[in-house]
Image: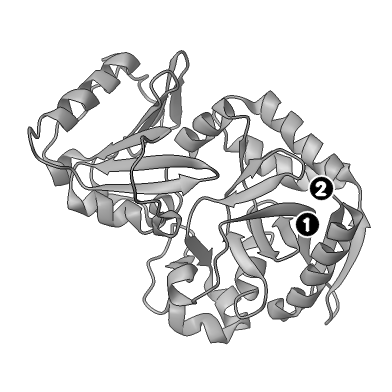
């Protein structure tokens, strides 16, 4: 089966219901409508959780239609792509229609820019890694974003009425902990781990996923969050996963102008402190983890990130043993950076 025939199979599957109406969820990312169409209710439940905060129910054709199915739950046929043997990494096909396959799990994401159609196939929804369900479709959304001149970033973001700060760094650098530490303050969450960057004057950051993840060590530092994470599903690294916007009213913001880039780090003292850094230092913190996770378009992505780092003030934030103490410094950074714009 070719990549093109994968789209033909999806046409057959989603037409095979005759008059049956498939569950769907329409969301808005930046200023574009995206519709997710599911082959069964279970898929809608699993993937809908992380996108509900972007709800955009109403008339109008979507800019992107994504079809989601699994044979185990829906009884629909599985694609039979010709894949390389003996490889547990990802197989990547380029062309007018793009496709990426996780050979270990059998998960497939595909995107056809000509038709605005995306596909997600998973063998069994109930066997899906909770970490993927918390931030799904990343490659597909990356390809779609490129078509609009946007970029999917591996970054957290928090914002107030003055604008947003991107929190950047490799996995484990404290982005998610710092983001969740802002709950209960005037700072709202735009993103935990992945967000959409839209260049412009000013540039904007947009929410993608409503899921938030932290580990037991971080929860111990912020015990007021412990009830929300009690019994939460865990990702493969043992991080609890919740939708903070559903647990904490008013904690979510959909978008904001980008005022600053912050590189968080664990400080040696008991207090929080911050200082200006160069665009190159900020880019070193942002680019590797973002580029590593992208399939295609890496050179263009690096150029866009470099432009962003040059255009907004960049800061290093040293955080003491209490993550919530970072709230005021982050507010100060956003306010000061907004005045520089």
For label 1, count other residues whose C-alpha is less than 10 Å away and answer few (under 14), some (14-19) or many (20+): many
- x then y, percent, for residue 2: 30, 14
Q: Nearer the viewer, residue 165 or 302?
A: 165
Tell me the quarter of the picture where residue 233 sits: bottom left
Q: Secondary structure at mark 2?
A: helix
| In-front residue for pair 114/330 | 114
> Which residue occupies the foreground of this view, 28 or 106?
28
Task: Identify the mark nearer the N-term, 1 or 2.
Answer: 1
Q: Position of residue 156 (x, y in %)?
A: 64, 56
Are circles 1 and 2 on residues that touch, CB within 8 Å? yes
Residue at 46% in and 47% down: 28
Q: How many marks?
A: 2
Q: Which residue is mark 2?
A: 282
Residue placed under numbered mark 1 in the picture = 263
Regarding residue 107, the answer to whether it shows in the image is no
Which residue is found at the position 54% from the left and 66% from the top? 252
**Relative to residue 264, is residue 298 drawn left or right?**
left
Q: Position of residue 209 (x, y in %)?
A: 48, 54
What residue sits 76% from the left and 48% below the top? Answer: 285
Q: Residue furthest front?
A: 59
**Which residue is rendered at x = 84% and y = 80% of the image?**
271
Residue 83 visible here: yes
Helix, strand or loop at label 1? It is strand
Instruction: Please state if 70 lies on the left or on the right of 279 as rendered.
Output: left
């Amino acid at each position: 089966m070719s990549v093109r025939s994968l789209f033909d199979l999806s046409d057959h599957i989603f037409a095979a219901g005759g008059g049956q109406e498939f569950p769907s969820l329409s969301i808005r990312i930046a200023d574009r409508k995206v519709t997710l169409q599911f082959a069964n209710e279970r898929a809608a439940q699993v993937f809908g959780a992380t996108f509900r905060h972007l709800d955009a129910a109403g008339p109008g054709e979507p800019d992107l239609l994504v079809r989601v199915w699994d044979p185990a739950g829906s009884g629909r046929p599985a694609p039979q792509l010709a894949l390389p043997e003996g490889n547990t990494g990802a197989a990547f096909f380029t062309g007018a229609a793009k496709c990426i396959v996780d050979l270990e799990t059998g998960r497939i994401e595909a995107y056809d820019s000509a038709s605005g159609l995306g596909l997600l196939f998973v063998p069994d929804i109930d066997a899906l890694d909770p970490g993927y369900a918390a931030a799904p479709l990343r490659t597909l959304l990356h390809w779609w974003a490129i078509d609009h001149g946007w970029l999917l970033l591996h970054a957290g973001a928090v914002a107030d009425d003055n604008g947003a700060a991107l929190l950047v760094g490799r996995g484990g650098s404290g982005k998610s902990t710092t983001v969740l530490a802002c709950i209960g303050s005037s700072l709202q969450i735009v993103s935990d781990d992945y967000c959409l960057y839209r260049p412009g004057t000013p540039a904007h950051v947009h929410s993608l996923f409503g899921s938030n993840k932290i580990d037991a060590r971080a929860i111990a530092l912020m015990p007021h969050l412990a009830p929300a994470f009690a019994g939460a599903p865990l990702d493969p690294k043992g991080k609890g996963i919740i939708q903070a916007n559903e647990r904490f009213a008013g904690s979510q913001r959909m978008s904001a102008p980008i005022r600053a880039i912050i590189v968080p780090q664990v400080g040696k003292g008991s207090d929080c402190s911050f200082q200006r850094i160069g665009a190159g230092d900020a880019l070193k913190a942002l680019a590797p983890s973002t580029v590593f996770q992208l399939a295609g378009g890496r050179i263009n992505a690096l150029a866009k990130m470099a432009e962003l780092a040059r255009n907004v003030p960049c800061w290093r934030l040293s955080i003491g043993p209490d993550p919530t103490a970072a709230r005021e410094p982050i507010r100060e950074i956003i306010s000061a950076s907004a005045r520089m714009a």
